[in-house]
Amino acid sequence: MPNDDKQKFIDFNQQVIDEFRANHGRVGGPFEGGRLLLLTTTGARTGTPHTTPVGYLPDGADRVLVIASAGGAPKHPHWYGNLLAHPQVTVEDGVFTYQARAEVLEGEEREQAWARAVEAEPGWAAYQKKTERVIPVVALYNSTQGGPGHINASSPGEAIKVVHDAFRRELALIRKEMAAGNGTLGAQLRVNCLTFCQGLHNHHTGEDTMMFPFLTDRHPEAAPVLKRLSEEHEEIAGLVAELRRTLAGEHADPAAARAEVERLTLDLEAHLTYEEEKLIPLLDATA
């Protein structure tokens, strides 16, 4: 790559990184509306950290997938060579920053993940046609002990808002993907839905077992609010369970799945809005 082009690429990446960090994962330009994370690897030769914006695929509660396409270039991207040499990486998803272990998928596991990716976004297949190398698929396993990682917020109130907004963005993406599915329910879309369901379950479990008891102890006057929120968690858990049932089986009904996602969206948005209204002042006052 000529020096001028290389510098333009570096400057563009830095602009995306700065925007991503300033807006809790939201960016414009070519990445707008997509799933993006910041991947920090250790240089294979230099030993210095390098941060790169990378698109990702949800893949369950404990890992995400990234694809070393380099736009179909003949060589693997630098970040891929770095993580081969140093598999411990840092991931920023806009809400949390956490340590992860990188593992290159092989054999059938790689083929299944690649097939899901191509089904969801044909552009990956176009990249593969441009190069003779087999484009790697890499799993990033969260290795942070005791939780999802460091939350990127300056106060407890801001923390709950950025987590809620991340759920809102992911649910909006799922709804968009369902609308674009032309009556089908692809394998990656199912994984996206199930990953969202698991993340929401984990979040509400953490609130029920840690945050709500903490607030009850310090703000007993808030007991009716916390009771209502706990009851809403149970109602939302029922909607999540119904969505899971709708997604189960080889011949899941796309229309039924869309209907369940819409029901979940309406109830969850009302719940998140009420929780922010009532809890952010309490959390920031306690802090």
Image (tube, helix red, strand yellow):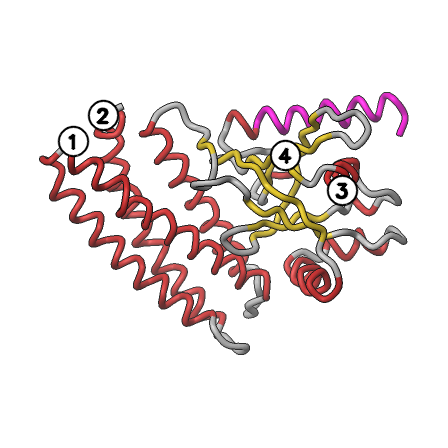
Q: Secondary structure at mark 2?
A: helix
How crowded is the residue under tag 1: few (<14 C-alpha within 10 Å), some, or many (20+)?
few
Residue at (90% x, 53% y) in the render: 132
| Tag shown at residue 218 | 1
Residue closest to the eye, 31 or 79: 79
Magenta residues (range): 1-19
**SS class of the residue under badge 1?**
helix
The reply to whether callout 4 and callout 3 are in contact (CB within 8 Å) is no
Q: Which residue is mark 2?
A: 286
Where residue 164 appears, as percent x and y from the top left, is 38, 41
Q: Say which residue label 3 marks.
A: 84
| Left-right relation of 107 to 233 | right
Would you call the spot at circle 4 few (<14 residues within 10 Å), some (14-19), or many (20 or more)?
few
Residue 185, percent across and down? 55, 68
Measured in 3D between alpha carbons, the distance from the residue under mark 4 to the one under mark 2, in whole angstroms, is 39 Å
Please name the residue that numbered disc 4 is placed on. Answer: 29
Spatial CA distance of label 4 from label 3 is 30 Å
